[in-house]
Image (cartoon, helix red, strand yellow):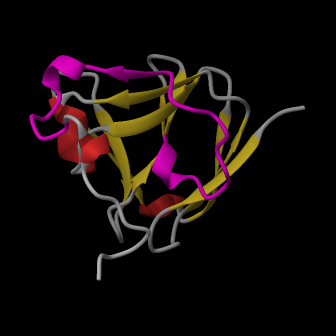
Amino acid sequence: MSETHCGSCLCGQVRFEVQGAFERFFLCHCSHCRKDSGSAHAANLFSSTASLQWLTGQESVRSFNLPATRHTRSFCTACGSALPYADAAGGFLVVPAGSLDSELRRRPDAHLFTASRAAWDQGLESIPSFPGFPS
């Protein structure tokens, strides 16, 4: 039985479906991923066999390729949300984990480029946590 995952952008203009299994799930701390996620790391799923189908809004999907690197980011032109992209040269599909609407039961395989990890991204387990905004 093949896996099917559905996803969308924040504004809902773009919706997609991924048919097939993800082989890898990485949390990447490189400076490029930190910049394009605006966070401590990017959380991306990789597949060499899954297929991507745009259900709505494909005309709103743009990709940015960082010159002289292998770094690519696809996004919705309306809301800026990260979206999947197919790397034709590498033969794999990259899906931002946060773009999925369906439940993902897979846990990350590894943290990557930890030498580039942000200085503030250390020991975060020890800071307070709240189920919503603190009161």
Q: Quadrant of the C terminus?
A: bottom left
Residue at figure coordinates x 63%, y 28% from the top left:
22
Residue at figure coordinates x 31%, y 35% from the top left:
72
Furthest residue to the right? 1
Q: What main secondary structure does the magenta stretch of the protein show?
A: loop
Q: Which is nearer the eye, 93 or 67?
A: 93
Q: Quadrant of the N terminus?
A: top right
For the image shown, how many numbered marks are present on the structure? 0
Instruction: Look at the picture and state if 103 lies above or below 135.
Output: above
Left-right relation of 22 to 69:
right
Q: Which residues are magenta?
A: 96-121
Residue 126 in view (yes/no):
yes
Residue at figure coordinates x 41%, y 38% from the top left:
43
Q: Which is nearer the eye, 128 or 6?
A: 128
Q: Position of residue 116 (x, y in %)?
A: 15, 24
Residue at figure coordinates x 40%, y 73% from the top left:
132
Instruction: Look at the picture and state if 45 lies above or below 54.
Output: above
Instruction: Look at the picture and state if 51 lies above or below 68.
Output: below
Q: Is residue 103 magenta?
A: yes
Left-right relation of 37 to 122:
right
Furthest residue to the bottom? 135
Q: Position of residue 34 (x, y in %)?
A: 21, 40
Quarter assignment of residue 81 = bottom left
Q: Position of residue 91 (x, y in %)?
A: 53, 18
Q: Which is nearer the eye, 121 or 74?
A: 121
Q: Is residue 100 magenta?
A: yes
Residue 66 in view (yes/no):
no
